[in-house]
Amino acid sequence: MTDTQTLDSRPTTRPATHEAADGQQLIIRDLHVVPVAEPSREILRGINLTIRKGEVHAIMGRNGSGKTTLAYALLGHPAYQVTSGEVIWKGRNILQLSPDKRGRLGLFLAFQYPTAIPGLSVASFLRTALNARMRPLDGADTDIDPSDPTRGGIKMGEFRNLIRAKMAMLRLDESFAARYVNEGFSGGEKKRLEMLQMAVLQPEMAVLDETDSGLDIDALRIVAEGLNAQLNPNLGVLLITHYQRILNYINPDQVHVLAAGRIVASGGRELAVRLEQEGYAPVLREAGLEPDQADEAEPAEPDPAEPADAAGSH
């Protein structure tokens, strides 16, 4: 049996049926997004997508197709403006909420290009983020203040036990917690820290922006195992990727193709395999798009180097 077969054959805890209530699914309706720096240039042109808890959805597309724009718009990146549409999560249109409130509501974003924070240890960063995640969504709270050492939420001993358990699950050495956030990290270490953040914060809907980007095959496998270890009926995942290879290790419920600012095809894992074998051109033609025209319609996305500041999107 191959490594891929071993991972794919693991028993899953995903539910066979799903509740239709808004609290169990992320609903994206007719989402249109432009870059703030150039509002006349529409990148997303009517995205419609529903992701339920317990499901893994993969979005694939060429460079510049709008994949990162979608991820950042969902978490409230200030470089992007939503011009129309809505995103419903737990009965709320989250587009009306600040990034930190979206994080506290259970959303999480793993970045394609994680930022280094010299002088801030991984442990301190995670404890502050977790305390911020625990704060109530609405109204003032007098019990938890992540910036106050006496009202900092989770007790230090409890946090140590938590982070040790999560690092063990992800096969990280305990010394990892003392290092400064992403400073001097390899590409694989940066992505494993993203998985550690996700494990500690325990979101209910995670958006992973090209988590496989820049990883060699060994690092890719380790990161995929870290994600697989966290899949459960209370977690929905939107996995954004350019290549099919990460789907050799993570079994998606649905695969979608993003082109010309909208989803032009959806299917099962066989769609990802077809893209790997044939490229995007045949699928785009079936959707009524000429590949060259689709590329022209999709200008390069703005530089994502400045991430939004959110408790759940770090």
Image (cartoon, rainbow, N blue to C red):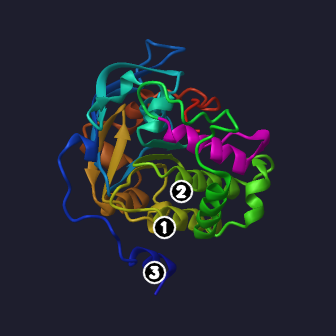
Q: Which residue is at 43% across, 24% downward?
A: 139
Furthest residue toward bottom:
1
Range of magenta residues: 111-135
SS assignment at label 3 = helix
- In the image, residue 188 lies in the stretch drawn in magenta: no
Disc 1 + disc 2, Cβ < 8 Å: yes
Pick whichever, 66 or 84, lies toward us: 84
- The residue that disc 1 covers is 229
Residue at numbered disc 2:
199
Marks 1 and 3, Cα distance to the nearest angstrom?
Answer: 14 Å
Residue kind at label 2, given as amino acid type: Ala
Residue 230: give x, y in percent of width and height. Answer: 47, 62
Q: Secondary structure at mark 2?
A: helix
Tell me if label 3 and label 2 are in contact, CB under 8 Å. Answer: no
For the question of whether residue 66 can be seen, the reply is no
Residue under label 3:
6
